[in-house]
Amino acid sequence: MEHPFILLFSKSNRRILGVMSGTSLDGIDIADVSVTGSGKDLQWTLNGFYSQPYSDGLQKILLLNSDSETGSLPQITVLGDIVAQEYESAIHSAIGEWGTDLSDYSAVGSHGQTLYHQPELLQLDSFSGVGSIQVGDPAMMSHRLGIPVVGDFRVADMAFGGHGAPLVPYFDYVTFCDPNESRLLINIGGIANITALPAACGLQDIRAFDTGPGNMILDVASRQFLGEEFDRDGRTASRGTVSSILFDELVSDEWFAAAPPRSTGREMFSAAYNQRVFGSAEALGLSTEDLLATLTSFSARTILDAWERFVRPDIEIDSVLVSGGGIYNKALMSILRGGFRGIPVSTTAAVGVDPDAKEAVCFAVLA
């Protein structure tokens, strides 16, 4: 009997489950994707999409273990299995809803849940290295599901000299590259990232990198000051006034001036970072509305600044396509539309790609 991976590589048509849970920690997304071909000739079709929040209490455990000051090695060790079980439960719920069976799929592409990301060399005595920790063990998932599971995408990218993030540029290339139009793809999850695709581009022409926080700090502020998981539609932010003093403090970090390639995550925008920001807001006497207005501006303006500094001088963008949870923040999207000054800004739905499903589809394609 041939090994499942041999069978997978020999198939011209593959049906793959993509599993994604991002830095927002808002839950698990699963995409049922049919894939044909490879490289620039790759084609994909989304057959189904399913989202499920994390089980009660698990989000808090993951948050604590995403911070070097509150993380626990024993907990991180077993979270590989616990998150794998959570993914498996979500997969079974998804295929139950779709009326499919695990035997219908060639493989699973699973991103895992990032706890810590270290793309720059870290010196340990006379040693140095890079790394990235995603929990949700692919081997355990594969054993229990009975089909191949592809994972460790970030470390694989680092092995080839990449930063391990963002991972969507290749997917953006095969999906959105247009012969006549230069496009800027923006994904606003916990972290925001951009992919610039010049018209008729080759792989060597792509420019992609993280721009900074997307929803991450906004969501922490919403939980702490509103008692809500997020600022729905950006309503609270839209009632506030941006504090120029706090805004200038936020953007003064040298990371934002660093040229690509670059990536970031909770290791930089940690619980301690958030509390410093909230302490500054309190010292300035900012209302919750003003704090959220400033944080929303921070997320949007750092995206715009990244485009201005590192894309616009070389690539004249014809359209902007946005995906991720940030598309539902009307205050944030309004700033982006104003900042792109006449360049059309829409979600990826405008070109037939579900903006909520995009990243889960990406990991099915990368598998």
Image: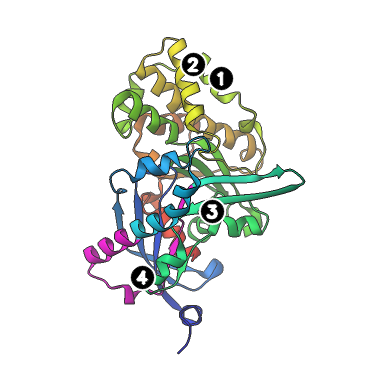
Q: Cα distance, mark 1 to mark 3? A: 29 Å
As rendered, which of 210 and 198 lies closer to the eye? Answer: 210
**Residue highlighted by disc 2:** 280
Are circles 2 and 1 on residues that touch, CB within 8 Å?
yes
Q: Cα distance, mark 2 to mark 4? A: 48 Å
**Residue highlighted by disc 1:** 249
As rendered, which of 204 and 358 lies closer to the eye? Answer: 358
Badge 2 or badge 3: first in the primary sequence:
3
Query: Depth-wise, is mark 4 or mark 3 nearer the camera?
Result: 4
> Percent x, y for residue 138?
46, 64
**Residue highlighted by disc 4:** 145
Badge 1 or badge 4: first in the primary sequence:
4
Which residues, given as a range, are shown in magenta? 88-114
Would you say residue 254 sits in the magenta stretch? no
Q: Residue at x 48, y 59 (%)?
A: 175
Residue 200 showing in the rendered view = no
Element assignment for label 3:
loop
Q: Which amino acid does label 4 sit on?
A: Leu
Query: Depth-wise, is mark 2 or mark 3 nearer the camera?
Result: 2
Q: Residue at x 65, y 59 (%)?
A: 159
